[in-house]
Image (cartoon, grey):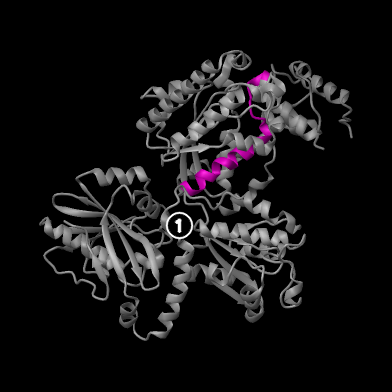
Amino acid sequence: MNKLKNKINVKNAKTISDYISLSAQIEKDFGENRSATPKSIRIGFLSSFTTKGIQEVLHVQCFGLGAQIHFFESAYKQYAQEILNKRSNLYKFNPNLIILFIDIASLLSNLACSLHQQSELARKKWVNEQINELDAFVSALKSNSDAQIILHNFETPSHSALGILENKQPFGIIESIEHLNAKLRHRFKLDSRVFLFDYNSFLSNIGKQHARDEKMYYLGDIKLNWNHMPALGNAYLSYIKPMLSLNRKCLVVDLDNTLWGGIVGEDPMEDLKLGPTPEGRPFLELQQYLLSLYHRGIILAINSRNNPSDALKVLRTHPHMVLKEKHFSSIQLNWNDKASNLRSIAKELNIGLDSIAMLDDDPFMRDLVRSTLPDVLIIDLPPDPARYLSSIMKLNDFNTLQLTNEDKVKGEIYAAERKRKVVKLKALDLTTYLKALQTKVTIEKASKRNFPRIAQLTQKTNQFNMTTRRYQESDIKRFSDSPNYLVCSVKAKDKFGDYGIIGAAIVEKKKELWQIDTFLMSCRALGRHIEQALLYYLIQSAKARKVPYLRGEFVPTSKNELAKHFYRDNGFLPKKNEDTVQYFHFDLSNKYKKTEHMKVTLPKA
Amino acid sequence: MKPLEKILSKIFRVRESSLSDDSSQDTIASWDSMTHLLLVSELENQFGLKFTTGEVTNFKTVLDIKKALESHGIDLNK
């Protein structure tokens, strides 16, 4: 299969026809292997005009990421019927993601030129009607499906028949549409299922005068120039990547000619290009941007071929370094090859190589790593440092669907982990070490407050995850609301810092036994028996209800080997083994030993 | 610059050898209103030109397309 895959180079696709041919080629070569790709998404696409090509673009782009899509597109101008009819083909298709793309011309229809002539009051009424209708569409989509929803906002016109007097109008037409966009933004800000896609800003970025090919518009009702369809697909990938856990958690940076200009071992520190000079500012501003990524939860690490003392001296003492030692969760300064350093970083941070992106100015090094570690995302930097920042800003690989409090302090958590490891080296035996950490663990039942984080953990946790079932926030809510399920999360802190919520469990309460549907722990919290504390809580809860057995499942994946023996090591007996799942029983008449070296707070019964 | 036949073959998913100047919407089954526009878009991209709406609606046969390209100064024999 890989041989075949090499034959298809997604990067060769340029025009819409390239995408259409390539999509057909992929379907021909891989159509039967659909189920072999574990990551797949079902997209329902609703639009108010001809969007021929978007399916093929997304198909090819997702294929390039190793993911499959299943696509449903509403018939021409049938989006309202698909949305409002509960038994429509859209809902039968059972999408994970629905994209609703209504363009401004369809919204205005015959008002496009006459809205000017109407009264201020009439325009306000029109805006309110549009908001109410869109709101009704989104409500119907939400109640008739489980999908996440992307709603386009609207292009604000860059031309008015009133010319320079447009902005003298009371509630003019441009103001009306800006108002509509602002209202929509506000309306869905707190709705975790709905994402307002800023199509207006997308078009500004392309240049509105180039966004439409008038001839194609008149001949085929094509409102976005085909040449920009790949960019639109790429914008949708910003949402699809985190939905399929294809986003990157960690950015590994080189130092020389990446974070600063010049080479630290060869140039004196004062000659390095970094600071408020024409040649220094590209690096300064790049560092400022990387710091903002750090503050939104992206882990930073260094991978550089340098003498540690030279490089650390710059990191610690250069007056214009924005990024400090404390911002990096792993620092690899040595003469090893970069690929093995990346492996060390992944190991140290307990993350997969497929969570890592690499920033390096050296094209040779990039190719080398690309060929040895294909899972790592290699960012292609342009030769001119002045263009570094804009090429990094274009990436859509660092998105998450929610920003939890844990994300905001994640960098600190990992930096604290580096300190913990130092203590670990000094402490001789594990129990002393664990005691010295003064860990405090709190187990809580799921509630509205922690739904997003629990869902996120099911999405992102790969290694210590017994079943790797991925859930959306809406699923967690459904489990939590049901009397047949117990959903709980665990948070921890110790003398170095607060981990936040790092584990979760979902248990189905059947009469004859309780079945553990999901049991997972974020890797950075492993190795200190917090998982035993969580299991202890499940066992105690089941005992309290006089259930005879607690059943655990282990569903092997390529990444969760780590968790394989967890149930067996904790007093469960292996039961039947199937190819895809192993079952374990815990007899609840047995005792389960409580972990002693930490303080555990359980929820009230 | 890519020869015309290659583009036609890609858009209509037919063999290059099956194409002639007389090939038209009647002889190529996949030549419909949408592939017609895709063809126009691809020709414009590959040859770096813009057709008018009138030119595009007059493409009935491969020969029509050749003539239109030639009128834009494209030498297809090069």
- Magenta range: A218-243
Query: In the rendered structure, does residue A232 fall within the stretch colored magenta?
Result: yes
Q: Residue at the spot x=75%, y=70% of the render?
A: A262
* The C terminus of chain A: image quadrant: bottom left
Residue A163, position as x, y percentages in the image: 71, 22
Would you name the residue on which mark 1 appears?
Answer: A407
Residue A7 in the image: state x and y as whole percent. 64, 49
Pick the front one: A378 or A496: A496
User: Counting other residues with Cα less than 10 Å from the Cα at mark 1, is it few (<14), some (14-19), or many (20 or more)?
Assistant: many
Q: Residue at x 58, y 74 (%)?
A: A332
Residue at position x 19%, y 63% in the image: A586
A106, above or below A539, in the image: above
Q: Nearer the viewer, residue A117 or A510?
A: A117
Q: Could you tell me the amino acid type at mark 1?
A: Asp
The answer to whether residue A555 shows anywhere in this view is: yes
- In the picture provided, is A240 more to the left or to the right than A540? right
Q: Chain of mark 1?
A: A
Taking the image as shown, residue A308 lies to the left or right of residue A467, namely right
Taking the magenta stretch, the answer to whether it contains residue A229 is yes
- Pick whichever, A215 or A328, lies toward us: A328
Element type at mark 1? helix
Residue under the image location 42 percent in, 53 percent down: A404
Residue A598 at x, y percent in the picture: 27, 73
Q: Where A308 falls versus B48 (above or below)?
A: below
Q: Main secondary structure of the magenta part?
A: helix
